[in-house]
Amino acid sequence: MSTARPPIATPLPSADAPSEAGTASAAGAPSVIATVSETGAPSGITAPRTAVAPPAASLPADGPVRRRRALDWRARFAILTLIWGFSFLFMKVGNEGFAPLQVSLGRLAFGAAVLITVLAVKRERLPRSPRTWGHLAVAALFLNALPFTLFAYSEMTIPSTLAGICNATSPLWGMVLSLVALSEDRPTRRRVAGLGLGFLGVLTVLGVWQGFPGTDPAGTAMALGASLSYPIGWIYLRRTLAHTEETHLSMTGAQLLLATAQLAVVNPLFTSFPTSFSLMPLLAVFALGALGTGVAFLMQYGLVAEVGPTTAQMVTYFVPVIATAAGATLLHEPLSWNTPVGAVIVVAGAALTQSRSRRADSGKD
């Protein structure tokens, strides 16, 4: 869920936020691309247009599919929020027994295993087009391999609470990039205000007036870089595979396989094989991958299909809250007043960039 939008992208009928431009995370747009930000948590690229969701082709033209499920969507929404919110804690614990690159590789491998298993059960096939695989390889780098690794490395020197809050800046980066890369996006006053508010929140979290006390600049930069990587991947997918006929499950399964292969090649160059496997770090990596990257994506897709991307995207705004609470209570990470206050400001700014005024809806803003 970059955690989080955790992250994974698939073609949507609109985008990573509710509508047409797409995001997290985890998790991850025929007219838009949605994905799971760190945790796989969703984040958006344009005003009300963003959400971690399935390909447009998989959703009916007359609106989201509403099926009776054994578990109410609100309960699944809460579970998804918890899974993605705890992803940052899982990374911190995983780093205690493995190198950050190994944590990311394990996360991707377990996540890919879940989706490939579901593909096999549903008898769906992976994409066949070399062109599709080529574009997915680029998406796998920016939506999975790179941000997952940057977040894991960042948590070597910064608290998981700070990493979780940095992940919430993904919609802000997405808005900035979409204004440059997507000609249909307009810098409305509401979105610009949200952008400014969001980055004010980041400065509040870091305690800029105190000279960034107790904050590792390199670790913070890596966490922010991971959040920036997601919208780069979302925009790339939107511009290259927005109209693919492949299913969301097929695309995401292939994407995770490619990201796993990328890190499998890189790992031996920078790490040595672990001499021991501690139980808690191993369980943390398994939960990070199987739950935060595999199961969470499937749950997010189900929510989008049932209640629509706008409602499903709201999970993004609760992830920093869970990440902060988990880090402070279970890992006993220090928590000063400016951290939760700044987190609220960041989330408010991100939400504002994804909101749409009535005037904007009528084309007057």
Image (cartoon, rainbow, N blue to C red):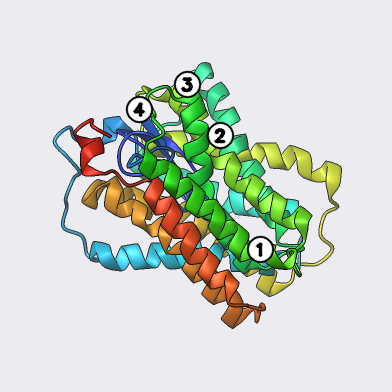
Q: Secondary structure at mark 1?
A: helix
**Nearer the observer, disc 4 or disc 2?**
2
Res 40 visible: no
**C-beta proximity under 8 Å, tags 3 and 1:** no
C-alpha distance separating marks 4 and 2: 16 Å
* Residue at x 55% of width, y 63% of height: 87
Q: Earlier in the sequence, mark 1 or mark 2?
A: 1
Q: Around disc 2, counting alpha carbons within 10 Å, would you say few (fewer than 14), some (14 to 19), or many (20 or more)?
A: many
In the picture of the structure, the residue carrying the numbered disc 2 is: 232
**Which amino acid lies under the numbered mark 2 shown in the image of this protein?**
Ile
Q: Secondary structure at mark 3?
A: helix
Q: Secondary structure at mark 4?
A: loop
* Residue at x 18% of width, y 45% of height: 65
For the C terminus, the quadrant is top left
Q: Earlier in the sequence, mark 3 or mark 2?
A: 2
Q: Around disc 4, counting alpha carbons within 10 Å, would you say few (fewer than 14), some (14 to 19), or many (20 or more)?
A: many
**Is 77 situated left or right of 284 in this image?**
left
Numbered badge on residue 30: 4
